Amino acid sequence: MPSCLGIYIENNLIKYAKVNKDRNNFKVEAYGVKFYEDNIEKTIEQIVKETYSYQVPISVNINKENYTYSKIFNLLKDKDLEKAIETEFEFFCNNNNKNKNTLEFRRIKTNDLEDRDKIRVIYTYIDKASVVERLQLLDKYKARYVFPIATIIQNLNRALVQENSIIVNIEEETEITTLVNGKVYKVDKIEQGMANILKVIAERENSIKKAYEICKNTTVYTRTGQNLKIEGNEYLDIIIEELLAIIDKVKENIISSGLDINNIYITGMGLNINNIDLLFQENFLEKKCEILVPYFIEKTNVKINIKDYIEVNSAISLALQGLDTKNQEMNFSDEGTTIQKVWTLLTSDVGKGTILKTKQKKQKPTLNEIMNLELDFTDKMLLRVATALVLIIILYLATTEVLADKINEKLNQVELAIEQSNTEIAKVKEYNTLVNTREREYQTMLDNIEQANSMVTEQFSSKNAIPNLLNKIMYVIPKGVQLLSIENTTGKSIVITARAEKYDQLGYFKAALEEEGILTEITSTKGVKKEGMIDITISGNLPY
């Protein structure tokens, strides 16, 4: 199961999140925020130790990056297009008195909304020393990825693919990422942010950590909720003033872009302030303002504290980007390709004899000098062996890379098929649940119909029960037996009171009722003799 540790570094604090990937499922294994003063390396070591990430790839953010843009005709071939992108950046450096050799840049290509024949290129550039400095903090670990957070933060929400939206990432400074159809269209950085708030509070409280906790316990109120405002937070006005300044900058950004923005997503350290989304919504009534929540987090799971997760959104985004092996164009950690490493091996100074003598001059021999050298038998054999080994290595590496590409292609197809299958399975489960629900409803209806039918049948069968009973008794009643009463007590139960002068007459009558099947389960009382007559009570059930 691949994992990646995302580390987002700011002044005085580090956010971290370790994310595991199981096929298309992601899980945040560990996360948190740590503060540091001077020894940032020790804090990073503590994070790596606590998350068991010594052998886990690390994805970290760069800082002090800048952005510029250019437009290039999209009809160029790929090779010419890349050359044109490089040339445009050189023009930018020359026009702005920047030394291209000291800068490193990455670029994003997107469609230009104003001219369909051109593509819009977004350059993210930074001083090379800043990249090296950031990597040196992690030189003891597997620091493979260095990303500008503003260009990858949209990976927290897959729903952004079809939206024109902006992401307002309020960290120490605020970055506004504009997305068109889910793709980065431009990035703007503004001075306002949490750094100004934390600085004022920390100066009074003498602790950046305490300032951070005060922000977490602060609730901002909209105009309609001012009556709910709780007294006692002396920093509330400072916080609201900074947030309103950020909101004004966002409004200016939307107006200047001329784009129809549907949604505004809020993320970053600013999410520590309660109700910040409501404050944004009050100032953008025609747009939907919401907190950016990682798409794979179960919002309905009561065991998960969503606020703890979104507090480290930037670190989660870095980890997700590190796990996305297909999309690494914004990675500033240049480890070099396999072919480049082989080329370095081929161009290194190796050999002996005359070649060594040439190396003693501390100058690399030219190709003509090498071709004119007289080699002895040992030199020739070594060169032949070395050439054969190099060819074998190149062939092996080329084959491996081709196979790796094919395997990755097949894996992508399998993941897509699995995702589609899971979608279909979910639909089948939903249909199955619906069918089971309908089945229970129909069964209830059938039970009710059967019960009603039984009641009707019973009522119909008992309607003529007494007349039929009397008709049958007429043919079997012995001479001398009188019927005092016949009562249908409940349901099929019949009670007959009879009188006769002799016991055998009554016994014969009881036997006739049972033998002819007029009544079932017949019982009778002992005869009671009154004034020369004997009375008995016969009980039984109708046979239908």
Image: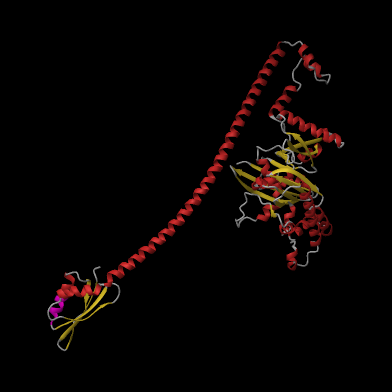
Count of numbered circles in the view: 0
Q: Residue furthest right?
A: 97
Q: Quadrant of residue 443?
A: bottom left
State which quarter of the image contains the C terminus: bottom left
Q: Nearer the viewer, residue 327 or 225?
A: 225
Which image quadrant: the N terminus? top right
Q: Residue at x 78, y 43 (%)?
A: 63
Q: Main secondary structure of the magenta part?
A: helix
Up/down of 168 relative to 401, above or below: below
* Most foreground residue, 218 or 465: 465
Residue 56 visible to the viewer:
no
Q: Is residue 66 magenta?
A: no
- Vertical order, 361 against 410 (above or below): above
Display colour scheme: secondary structure
User: In the rendered view, would you say 330 is above or below 499?
Assistant: above
Residue 182 at x, y percent in the picture: 68, 44
Is there any visible trace of residue 250 in the rendered image? Answer: yes
Rendered location of residue 153, percent (x, y): 70, 46
In the image: residue 126, left or right of residue 1: right
Which residue is found at the position 76% from the left and 44% from the top?
Answer: 187
Position in image of residue 379 (x %, y %): 72, 14
Residue 423 in the figure: left or right of residue 29: left
Quadrant of the image occupied by residue 436:
bottom left
Residues drawn in magenta? 502-509
- Across and down, in percent, residue 69 comes to 78, 39
Towards the viewer: 279 or 156: 279
Q: Quadrant of residue 217?
A: bottom right
Front residue of 24/432: it is 432
Farthest-out residue, bottom: 531
